[in-house]
Image (cartoon, grey):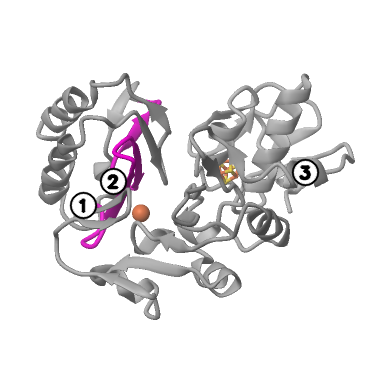
Amino acid sequence: MASLKKIISENVEGSFFVDSTCIDCDACRKIAPSSFVRGKGYSYVLKQPTSVREKMEAKQALISCPVGSIGMQEKESLVEAMESFPIDLGHDIYLNGFNHKSSYGADSYFIKSDLGNFMVDAPRFNKTLVKKMHEMGGLKFIFLTHKDDVADAKNYAREFGAKRIIHEDELSAQPDAEIVISGSGDTLIDDFIIMHTPGHTRGHMVLIWKEQYLFSGDHFAYSDIRGDWSCFKNVCWYNWEEQIESVERLARFPKITNVYPGHGRRNSVTPGEFPAIIQRVVAWMKT
Ligand code: SF4
Ligand SMILES: [Fe+2]
């Protein structure tokens, strides 16, 4: 729980605040960009929420903070904000919120599919979220992009009888996963394509749905700092050269229009522009 005793001095006066336990995961800045901004290795409240929408987003940020660094001085109910998850992002894709500390606050997603619903990476196991997922038809598969972001996947798999999908090189994070992907070829499950993308970690994988929606884990994302698409060399734990090569191979999917990463920013792509974006990012990665 956030403490006023540890309040970051940059917070503007008012109900919402961030304390010094913040790990700078970016989750609050993504959910409530009109209130939370980046400081030097932490977030703080630049503007108190005023409209109904801003207040809801600030509460969603508070709920999603993986380390409980966001506080609210005025006593207000969080029930409506809790029940707003998973948040509809359009295209039958939802943001789970409830980001987990063990995945450094990575975002995870829910996909409503005719084949059966997918979860991409995992959030905290939370009763309100679980109830909502039951109402949305439950979970059939839990796709784990890589070992960092498994969070409470095991509890969700048990709750829903869902099958966890992970690459053999990441198995240490989920040794009893139900579906283990081997080698480097694509795996097809109906209109889902699983692609091995080593680099950030050795067994990192991405999921592409309907050839349009890319769930990119920690492989590839939009960067608000660069103002362009990007990859993160400072957190490349395995091999940067292999990551460059893996990113280059994404150009095989020219119809991609939306990217949903674990860390980094979600963004859309003008139809047909994805190969040119990949070309630009690869050239930048090689510099
Ligand atoms: S969500 Fe929490 S830990 Fe992450 S940047 Fe915001 S305040 Fe910090
Ligand atoms: Fe990671």
Among numbered discs 2 and 3, the one appearing first in the sequence: 3
Q: Which residue is mark 1?
A: 197
Q: Quadrant of ligand 1?
A: top right
Q: CA distance from mark 1 to mark 2?
A: 7 Å
Q: Residues within 10 Å of mark 2 (few under 14, many from 20)?
A: many
Residues under numbered marks 3 and 1 in contact, where contact means CB atoms less than 8 Å apart = no
Quarter placement of the N terminus: bottom right
Residue at left offset 23%, top offset 21%: 273
In this view of the protein, which residue sits in the foreground, 134 or 67?
134
Among numbered discs 1 and 2, the one appearing first in the sequence: 1
Number of numbered discs visible in the structure rendering = 3
Does the magenta portion include 202? yes
Quarter placement of the C terminus: top left
Q: Secondary structure at mark 3?
A: helix
The nearer-to-camera label among 3 and 1 is: 1
Q: Which residue is mark 3?
A: 4
Q: CA distance from mark 2 to mark 3?
A: 36 Å
The three-letter code of the residue at mark 1 reads Thr
Q: Is residue 48 left or right of residue 20?
A: right
Q: Residue 131: x and y, percent?
A: 71, 59
Residue behind label 1 places its C-beta within 8 angstroms of ligand 2: no
Q: Residue 179: x and y, percent?
A: 34, 72
Q: Secondary structure at mark 2?
A: loop
Bounds of the magenta segment: 200-225
Q: CA distance from mark 3 to mark 1?
A: 43 Å
The picture quadrant where one finds residue 227 is top left
Q: Residue 84: x and y, percent?
A: 70, 41
The three-letter code of the residue at mark 3 reads Leu
Residue farthest along the bottom direction in this orientation: 176
Residue at left offset 55%, top offset 43%: 95
Q: Which residue is mark 2?
A: 219
